[in-house]
Image (cartoon, helix red, strand yellow):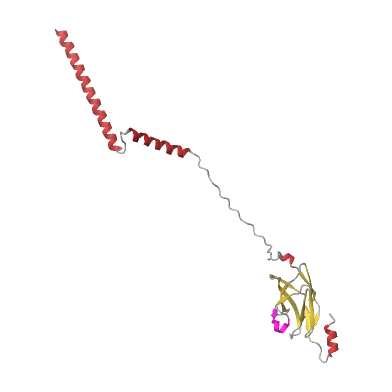
Amino acid sequence: MVVFVLIGGTMSFAFWSRYQFNGALSDLETTITANTLLVFPSLKKDTKLASTSLEIFETLASSSEETIPVTTTTTTTASLSADTSTDLGLSFTDLELSFNFPKKGDEVYIGCTYPISWQSSTTINSLETALIDAGARKSIDQTKSGLAKENTIEKDLQNLNWKVGVVYPGKYYIKVSSINDVALEIRSGIFTISNIPKGTSIDEKEKICSEI
């Protein structure tokens, strides 16, 4: 009798203990689930939504691992040439000019006409000229010097006729500041402008003017 009572009590305690354990485990699971949903309210139990979210994470991870090609832009700096060309294809080095007349030490006379001549590496179509006072380094007005500022040169002649104007006797030179519309500076040698002596006859004057 005592044995049956002990066995019955033991079984009753076992069933009670198991019930209490299962109840406690169920409460713990409920608590964990509730806390998880409270902290992460965006998580759902919908299997389809969970699968979509996983795919998004996998896609983002895959994109971050892809190698993005880098495009390199190369800036090229164009080199500038110091040689300036004209529309005629001429450069400063092509526009060389040296005077045959007047030259250093030449003497010309007021009222006489002289052919200003030169040697050039190219055909001269136009000249911009001025008569310069060698002492004062000032340009003489073309109405006084008789030397026009802008001159069109005949192709067959390649010279410029200059009738010496009424200027003060002294030392001068001719400056060329443009050839074929290309700006530059070329000078003749310094020469002397003199008056024809008074009392000179017309024949003698013509002889003086033609001596050069």
- Residue 72: x %, y % from top left: 55, 47
Q: Residue at x 79, y 78 (%)?
A: 115
Pick the residue in front: 89 or 200.
89
Q: Which quadrant of the figure contains the N terminus? A: top left
157, above or below 23, in the image? below
Asked if residue 175 is positioned above or below residue 91 in the image, the reply reads: below
Residue drawn 42% across the image and 36% down it: 58
Is 114 above or below relative to 11? below
Residue at the far left: name it. Answer: 1
Q: Which residues are magenta?
A: 138-146
Relative to 28, residue 104 above or below: below
Q: Farthest residue to the bottom: give it.
A: 199
User: Can you tell which quarter of the image residue 10 is in?
Assistant: top left
Answer left or right for 126 relative to 65. right
Residue at image point 33% right, 32% down: 47
Residue 18 is situated, as x and y percent measured from the top left of the image, at 22, 20
| Lateral position of residue 28 relative to residue 131, left or right | left
Q: Quadrant of residue 123?
A: bottom right
List x then y, in percent, for residue 101: 80, 76
Left or right of 203 on screen, residue 174: left
Q: Give the quadrant of residue 119.
A: bottom right
Residue 198, magenta (yes or no): no
Q: Nearer the viewer, residue 26 or 192?
A: 26
Residue 139 lies within the magenta run: yes
Residue 98: percent from the left, percent from the top?
Answer: 78, 71
Q: Residue at x 19, y 17 (%)?
A: 13
Give the position of the C terminus as an image quadrant. bottom right
